[in-house]
Image (spheres, helix red, strand yellow):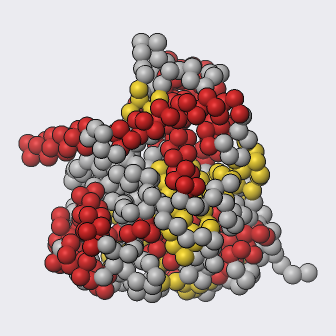
Amino acid sequence: MSRAEYVVGVDFGTLSGRALVVAVEDGTEVASAESVYAHGVLTDALPGRAGRRLPADWALQVPSDYVDVLRHAVPEAVRKAGIDPADVIAIGTDFTACTVLPTTRDGTPLCELPAFADQPHAYVKLWKHHAAQPQADRINALAAERGEPWLGRYGGLISSEWEFAKGLQVLEEAPEVYAAMDCWVEAADWIVWQLCGTYVRNACATGYKAIYQDGRFPATDFLTALHPSFGGFVEDRLAQTVAQLGDRAGTLTREAAAWTGLPEGIPVAVGNVDAHVSAPAAQAVDDGQMVAIMGTSTCHVMSSSVLREVPGMCGVVDGGIVPGLWGYEAGQSGVGDIFGWFAEHAAPAYVYEAAAAGGMSVHDYLSGLAAEQVVGEHGLVALDWHNGNRSVLVDHGLSGVVVGQTLATRPEDVYRALVEATAFGTRTIIEAFVGSGVPVEELVIAGGLARNSLLMQIYSDVTRLPLSVVGSAQGPALGAALHAAVAAGAYADIRAAAKAMGSVRKAVYVPDEARARAYDRLYAEYVALHDYFGRGGNDVMHRLRALRAEASREEREDR
């Protein structure tokens, strides 16, 4: 009797990394372990008691936290699985994106060099670092002026979250860092580099986050027009080898084998993005299936046989999710983060006391109260822009709004309105796709928020779609493991691996017609606010942000 074989998938999220041990034969999840990033997300200051203060809209990370996941979570997951490490035949990874860092030619992060330890631009720029919005605005304006053919593939706008805007910000604000930077690396590719010693770009992040279309990046003359010293950005600082999803990037080095406890020489899969890798994990590899990976933010991905230009989408890439289909991406910059902000900073003490008395979290307590309401009972409508808007407006200078509050408004009212606002944001995205000729017939939910039954039913009612749920609590890690199995040759391609190893529970939530009609009325109010504040009717959000930035500069100068 042959011995069972396993693969390990490692999901690098916003706050932690999770390792999952999966049986190759049928996708059975044997064990998992988590490693919380010691430094978390840096939004206020660099590490250390005297760490340099950070301006508004910055979000950085420390790359050694990622290596700690390999050192701790992977061997712990294998230990808990009770398997022989020799039976692990490959490892795969996924990462948040666009999470990017500057390194030397051998992959050393610049922030680990003494000369740059106190320079913010030498650190990892997390996906939700939005301080490069001015650079993104110039990229978009120039691309539109020149009629760049790739602009339509990104819904007409390039995000401040992506590689070129962040790279241009480094050049303009810290030219000494830019000069010392040999490589501008997606963290998804950097962690693979640490595992196998080979630096290759993955086709997913390269297509969606690095403006790589039809086999090429933006032209040198375009980059030079942005800044005379930016013309060599692609040739000098971006790896030119782009590897396809499911390919083998290399094999596990001796050093990485010592970190992970896995056999030296096993295949390491090409890197991937957490959202996109979740689609095969949910067996969502056909037309009409949109996957919403819901966590701190939400990323919406789907594959289609048709190529269309969808306003405000984050990109469409040939084979960006599965081979042979066009992979689409859209998203919301804040979802779970918004609920977390409200619970932490706006919920009063009596809510915490009541939740504790009931032995539940604040989120569960507020969700329970909100679930007792009928649609519209709270008299509120909100905009889900507390972390800016990723789709369809692509403007991270926007901010959140709650309309209709009175002295009778209670915390559960606002909480429900915020949940509904995120559902309205998803409906806005779906309508943009459908209106552009890309049908959406099913919404598949992955991520931790799928556990909230109130949220899930609201999403189904608002979108009028059946909601399926990925059958794994670790959807991205399962997807990474699935790609590892392909890289090891256990399956011919990602579709075959998805069919054998993926997991989904179909139509767990279905829309209620009466609630859906009521939500149509609320959604109309959301759209009116959306267009008023987001499409030029009132620029107050940008003016307030400018005032905040000015005050922040003055405060730093006073210090």
- Residue at point 50%, 57% (across, down): 330
Q: Please identify the quarter of the rendering in which residue 145 is found.
A: bottom left
Quarter of the image for the N terminus: give it.
Answer: bottom right
The residue at the point 42 percent across, 15 percent down is 406
- x and y percent of residue 228 in the render? 16, 78
- Tell whether 184 sits left or right of 479: left
| Front-most of residues 521 and 556 | 521
Query: What x and y, as percent, mark residue 295?
Result: 54, 49
501 and 413: which is toward the camera: 413
Vertical side of 469 occupied by 386: above or below: above
Q: Quadrant of the C terminus?
A: top left
Q: In the visual, does 371 lie left or right of 224?
A: right
In this rendering, the answer to whether 451 lies above or below 310 is above
The extreme top residue here reads 407
Kindly tell me whether residue 486 is visible in this rendering.
yes
Image location (x, y in percent) of residue 120: 25, 60
